Image: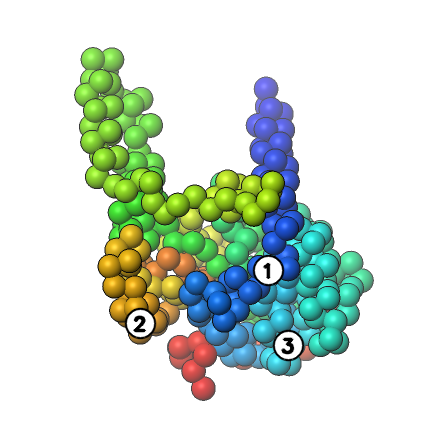
């Protein structure tokens, strides 16, 4: 019986990775335009936050764990870093190589790998290299629950002492503001903890509890937002594992991994719950952009996404591996807003 749990977890991980790879397999050629290009539904404000963090860190080498089609790396070519990255989906890696080749990034600097594997964080052509900065954007939503600590540990192990680590997440606490299916899931599963109430209820109390939970559900628009489906036969974003994260808990994972100066940066603000945007779309968009301040406390519930940033504080590799360390320690992260001159 003791070996059953790891086997089940391994099967769940394999299934999740296959579904995610299938989801993104037909997306490589248009992903950047849809999320970073001029026609994106919302400007990629996190790109400037990431650029500011990398620039402030003084990094000379940068690893993007889950780089997609070089979504961020293509916009980091002017930062003076040697750029590296890996992705789970082969089509994304091919697109990243094609996009980065004109900028002089060697194909060997981009490889296939999963953030759930220690070896993925080692460049195949230079496995002992340790980086000055490691970022992980758009990946954690697809990580099985219980694997977050391992991903953060691997990111910390990929950088040298003093190195920068940044991870992005979809803000679970945004559900306190949206009044939609995400709100219902947050209240039911993480605040009310309905399963525990069911376990504690006497048999004669269960019907009343179920009625109460049905009334609770009726308080939210659980039909919103619409489920994002695939473009062809592949599963869509909302049809594969796509979690939200509590930013406060993810910041704690950073500290447990030996990272210091940990901070949360909020982005993609919403002046009203998104379901109300249609009432005054132009005003909603202008007000949202005007709110973009990564240090505004309202981001805790009014921003749909966030970055957690920290610096590795000692020379002990959390992964238990020894790697080459080169170059001077990066400059400290200061209190300026990322992107400020």
> Which of the two labelled residues, at mark 3 and mark 2, occupies the earlier sequence position?
3
Instruction: Out of 50 and 164, give the one closest to the viewer.
Output: 50
Pointers 3 and 2 in contact (CB under 8 A)? no
**Residue matched to label 1:** 30
- Residues at marks 3 and 1, CA–CA distance in whole angstroms: 20 Å
Image spot of residue 69 (x, y percent): 64, 61
**Residue matched to label 2:** 286
Secondary structure beneath label 2: helix
Instruction: Out of 1 and 84, give the one closest to the viewer.
Output: 84
10 Å neighbourhood of mark 3: few (<14), some, or many (≥20)? some
Instruction: Out of 313 and 197, give the one closest to the viewer.
Output: 197
Secondary structure beneath label 1: loop
Residue 288's mark? none
Image spot of residue 58 (x, y percent): 57, 79
195, above or below 120, in the image: above
Instruction: Out of 289 and 267, give the one closest to the viewer.
Output: 289
Residue at image x 71%, y 76%?
103
Residue at image x 20%, y 28%?
212
Residue 79 quadrant: bottom right
Image spot of residue 253 (x, y percent): 47, 53
> Which of the two labelled residues, at mark 2 and mark 1, occupies the earlier sequence position?
1
**Residue matched to label 3:** 77
Q: Residue furthest top?
A: 204
Residue at image x 63%, y 44%?
22
10 Å neighbourhood of mark 1: few (<14), some, or many (≥20)? few
Secondary structure beneath label 3: loop
Image quarter in which the C terminus is found: bottom left
1, above or below 224, in the image: above
Pointers 3 and 1 in contact (CB under 8 A)? no
């Amino acid at each position: 019986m003791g070996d059953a749990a790891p086997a089940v977890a391994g099967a769940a991980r394999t299934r999740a990775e296959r579904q995610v790879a299938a989801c993104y397999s037909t997306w490589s050629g248009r992903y950047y335009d849809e999320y970073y290009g001029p026609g994106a539904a919302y400007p990629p404000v996190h790109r400037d936050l990431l650029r500011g963090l990398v620039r402030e860190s003084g990094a000379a080498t940068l690893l993007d764990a889950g780089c997609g089609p070089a979504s961020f790396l293509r916009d980091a070519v002017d930062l003076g870093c040697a750029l590296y990255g890996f992705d789970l989906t082969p089509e994304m890696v091919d697109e990243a190589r094609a996009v980065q080749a004109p900028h002089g990034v060697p194909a060997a600097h981009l490889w296939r790998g999963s953030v759930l594997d220690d070896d993925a964080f080692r460049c195949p052509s230079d496995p002992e290299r340790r980086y000055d900065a490691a970022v992980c954007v758009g990946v954690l939503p697809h990580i099985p629950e219980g694997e977050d600590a391992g991903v953060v540990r691997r990111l910390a192990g990929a950088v040298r002492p003093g190195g920068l680590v940044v991870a992005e997440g979809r803000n679970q606490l945004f559900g306190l503001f949206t009044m939609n299916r995400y709100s219902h899931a947050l209240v039911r599963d993480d605040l009310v903890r309905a399963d525990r109430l069911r376990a504690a209820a006497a048999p004669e109390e269960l019907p009343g509890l179920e009625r109460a939970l049905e009334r609770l559900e009726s308080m939210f628009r659980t039909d919103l937002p619409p489920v994002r489906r695939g473009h062809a036969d592949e599963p869509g974003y909302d049809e594969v594992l796509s979690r939200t994260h509590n930013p406060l808990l993810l910041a704690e994972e950073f500290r447990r991994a030996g990272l210091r100066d940990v901070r949360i940066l909020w982005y993609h603000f919403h002046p009203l719950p998104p379901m109300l945007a249609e009432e005054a779309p132009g005003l909603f968009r202008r007000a949202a952009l005007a709110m973009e301040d990564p240090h505004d406390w309202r981001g805790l519930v009014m921003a749909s996404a966030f970055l957690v940033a920290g610096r590795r504080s000692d020379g002990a590799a959390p992964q238990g591996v020894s790697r080459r360390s080169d170059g001077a320690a990066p400059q400290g992260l200061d209190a300026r807003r990322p992107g400020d001159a």
